[in-house]
Amino acid sequence: MPRPLVKVCGMTRMRDVELCVSLGVDLLGFIFHPKSPRNADPDFVASVKTGKVSKVGVFVNQTADEVLETMDRCGLHAAQLHGGQDVDFCWKIGPDRVIRAFWPDTYPSPRALLRDLENYAEVCGHFLLDAGGKGQGGTGKSIDFAMLQPIEIQTPWFLAGGLGPDNIREALAVHPSGLDINSGVEKAPGIKDETKLREVFRILAEME
């Protein structure tokens, strides 16, 4: 099995960007949310040149026009929507450029989660399943992986929520299309831990 896509989110420093690119990351995430300790400066994001690595902006409360403006200014390839944005909002951004977050822990059953995912299937290039609730991220909490076992998700999807060297193998067991890694590879919010990052990529290489 080929390894899933790897996205490292919460980037705030060029040295961490360079490390991730050297390790073979597929996507880099930059958070545009003033309340987040990982909030990124748009000028910094615009300055990041990553070659083939995609740049993703994480948005919570912005309007669609504000998201599009930031994407253009910063050279973003995709918008990760973490505020419960509706179907119309996703259409405005462009389905092929939307990564829409969902929070399995907030649903009464796997079937209810799947129904919601299916409602968004036409307007999202990818889903992201995260721990916690709407607008949250980087909490260090993990999803209850058992919630995902009974359902088959047709749209490519990322798994997020406290992923790091200690639980990456368990995460792979639910067969996500991608892994979204943030707090599980940090020394402090927005400051990545080189040892943990290298260990994650070592485990992934081992399992290919």
Image (cartoon, rainbow, N blue to C red):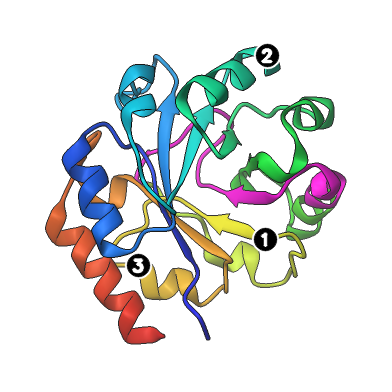
Which residue does the image show at 72% across and 72% down from the upper left? 150
Is 139 part of what is drawn in magenta? yes
Identify the amino acid type marked 1.
Answer: Pro
- Comparing 123 with 106, the one in front is 123
- Tell whether label 1 touches label 2 (CB within 8 Å): no
Q: Neighbour class for label 1 at 10 Å: few (<14), some, many (≥20)?
A: some
Tell me what residue is drawn at x 47 percent, y 76 percent: 3
Q: Please give the label number shown on residue 167.
A: 3
Range of magenta residues: 116-140
How far, Cα to Cα, is label 3 from label 1?
Answer: 21 Å
Question: Is 113 left, or right, of 55 in this rendering?
Answer: right
* Secondary structure type for disc 2: helix
Q: Between 148 and 3, which is closer to the camera in this rendering?
A: 3
Q: Which mark is residue 65?
A: 2
Q: Which residue is mark 1?
A: 156
**Separation of disc 2 and disc 1 at Cα?**
26 Å
> Which of pointers 2 and 1 indicates the residue nearer the eye?
2
Considering only vertical position in the picture, is 49 above or below 176?
above
Q: Nearer the viewer, residue 25 or 147?
A: 25
Query: Which amino acid is tagged 3?
Result: Asn
What secondary structure is marked by label 1?
A: loop
